[in-house]
Image (spheres, grey):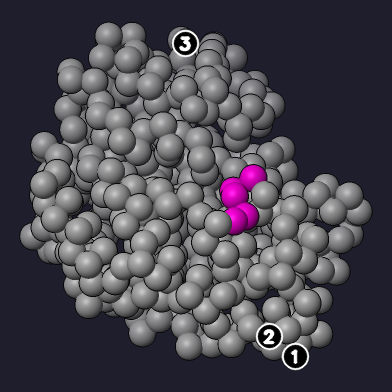
Amino acid sequence: MSNPSRRGVLRLTAGTALLGSLTLAGCGRGNDSTSTAATGKHVDNAPAKGTVNVWAAQGDADVLDKVLKPFKAANPDLDVKFTLIPNAEYYTKLQSAIAAGKGPDVAQFFSEAQAQFLDPSILRPVPDGLVDPSAFFASSWDAGVVKNVAYTVPWYAYTYALVYRSDLAKKAGVKAPTTWDEVVPFFKGLQGAGAGRALGADIGWDIFNGQDVAMYAWQAGGSLLSSGGKWTLDTPEMVDAIKYNASFFTSGAADSSGPTFLDAQPYFVSGKTACMITGPWVIGQLDAVAKKNGWTASHVATAPLPAGSSGSVSFSAGGSWGVLADSGNADAAWKLIRYISQPGTQVAQYKAYSSLPAVVAAWANPALASQPLLDAFLTQLKNTRAFPQVSTWQQVATRLGKEMEAVAKGKGTAAKAASNVQAYAESLGTGKG
């Protein structure tokens, strides 16, 4: 499976402001969820014609030419031209092209990092009736909506779940934790069964750690923005989330100095660690790391994230598509996106690249339904939230990740970390709407 954006485009954009000529979206977004409005012009069912230029990041889009063969055959008067750009360079080049008025008709976005583009000066609203918003995971759709206007259509989806060594859990006589209170005892059981550390935690102390604590805050009943669009990052719920994350390290279940991101899977396979809180792409990679076909099936299990006082909540991430405001062939562009959003196309994309569908109905296809290790991710995708679609969220999440380091290492308090992040977020605001 692919790893669509981890340590890639997000790292590039986390602290980078858009070019001055681009309008920053998101002011006054309100709370962490949105409506499902679409307000663009209706798109008919006539064949698409002309030329459509499509830009995407290398990765999941590498197979699009193959996946779209039936669409191109059904629309012989349409020429679809793809430009694939290295992941780490993608947003920079896209931003520059848009600022210069030389952008594509259709552009791919990362749903967890697209806030800066969600504005009518940059993207066209999704046309009425183009797709059914309820066909997608709710948070995947919400991630493209600002002020009740939808600007992007989800393509693939992923979230985090618990991936653990089932063989060590069986040896220890422990089951996957379902609540926060059960987590550290579960970790201790795995260590008692031979794991060096229970959790291979992310120790980058950056935006990804901040995203983790955001989902723990949701699990604790907190929010990131108030209904009035104000940052709410120093609440008791956020303090509880930071404490919970720190408990992985202070209990000895995780090491604050490793493994690094690239070492996580080798550590897991070797038994140096026994759990990962991670995305679904690891499932398809572990046999290769172990150098043994079938290793994953006999050594690995998955489970939804343990629930806090407000349940098991994770974040929504993945890919999406939008049509630029100055597209010269918006009609054909939307028809292309509509085709990509069909369940059959989403299944074809999964078969070609293991991209998990953002359309819920596609998960009923045997290609996915027969994969038991994906069940936890499907369950979790149904209980996710979109990160705030405000232009400063990535900077705030990066600062949150950095503040967590002192707490995890026992050198600072969760209350102080939350206070520092709140002050920083207030100094940034939420961007200009």
Considering depth in this image, is 125 or 17 the residue closer to the camera?
Answer: 17
**Residue 240, horizontal then vertical, whole percent:** 32, 77
- Above or below 186: residue 8: above
- Provide the secondary structure element on which disc 1 rests: loop
Which of the two marks, 3 or 1, is nearer to us in this view? 1
- Provide the secondary structure element on which disc 3 rests: strand
Numbered badge on residue 18: none
- Above or below 430: residue 139: below
Q: Quadrant of residue 105?
A: top left
Numbered badge on residue 173: 1
Q: Residue furthest bottom?
A: 173
Query: What residue sits 48% from the left and 49% below the top?
Result: 204
Q: How far apart in space, not on screen, are marks 3 and 1 (Cα)?
A: 60 Å
- Provide the secondary structure element on which disc 2 rests: helix
Considering depth in this image, is 259 or 217 the residue closer to the camera?
Answer: 259
Q: How far apart in space, not on screen, are marks 2 and 1 (Cα)?
A: 8 Å
**Residue 177, horizontal then vertical, whole percent:** 58, 83
Q: What stretch is highlighted in magenta?
A: 258-262
In the picture, measured across the screen, residue 46 lies left or right of residue 117, that is right
- Amino acid carrying label 3: it is Thr
- Amino acid carrying label 2: it is Gly
- Amino acid carrying label 1: it is Gly
Considering depth in this image, is 191 or 342 the residue closer to the camera?
Answer: 191
The residue to which callout 3 is attached is 51
Q: Is residue 424 magenta?
A: no
In the picture, measured across the screen, residue 291 lies left or right of residue 139, that is right
Count numbered badges in the picture. 3
**Residue 310, horizontal then vertical, whole percent:** 35, 81
- Above or below 91: residue 280: below
